[in-house]
Image (spheres, rainbow, N blue to C red):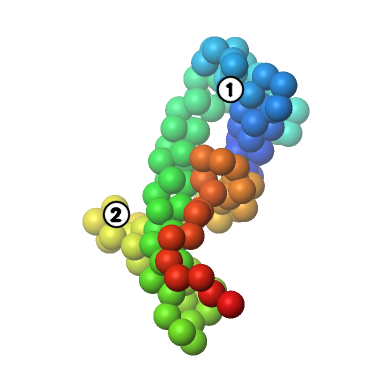
Amino acid sequence: MEDVSLCEAWLQICHCPVSGNEMKFFHMWKKIHAEFCEKIPGSTRTEMTLSSRWKILNKELGKWRDALAKAMDNYRSGENRTNEMIQAQMWFGATGGGKKSFNHHECWEVVKYCKRFIIIPTGPTLC
């Protein structure tokens, strides 16, 4: 739940059409922290701990995006989204030496349409 709230707060602050990417790092995390605390009242997390956690999530979400993109590009006739997800999990695991699977699907649902994580298909066009 905290990870999802962090992703929501990050998205809301960093993709604000008014201030968006014009903020300094410290000010950005101060605003993300305030937004996060509204979502999770009583949280003991600081700006620094949220920033550290985001660094980990950002890396995992980026690897998941790459694995999904690779699975989408490797589409075979007759396959469905389930096959695509299984293949993406295999590629994601391969990037970590086969030791782990992606388990931040709720976070992915929050950020998947933001510019940083959007998947631009490069394979053949499907009808």
What is the C-alpha distance between the residues marked 2 and 1? Answer: 30 Å
Position in image of residue 44 (x %, y %): 61, 24
Residue lying farthest to the left in this orientation:
97
Q: Is residue 37 in view? A: no
Looking at the image, residue 126 lies above or below residue 64: below
Quadrant occupied by the C terminus: bottom right
Amino acid type shown at disc 1: Asn
Q: Which residue shows up at 60% across the image and 42% down it?
A: 114
Q: Position of residue 6 (x, y in %)?
A: 61, 35
Q: Which residue is mark 1?
A: 21
- Number of other residues with Cα within 10 Å of mark 2, as a class: few under 14, some 14 to 19, many 20 or more: some
- In the image, 60 versus 65, the foreground residue is 65
- Quarter of the figure with the N terminus: top right
Say few, some or many: other residues with alpha carbon within 10 Å of mark 1 (under 14 / 14 to 19 / 20 or more).
few
In the visual, does 50 lie left or right of 37? Answer: left
Q: Could you tell me which residue is drawn at 62 percent across and 28 percent down?
A: 14
Query: Residue 68 location in percent, x, y?
Result: 45, 60
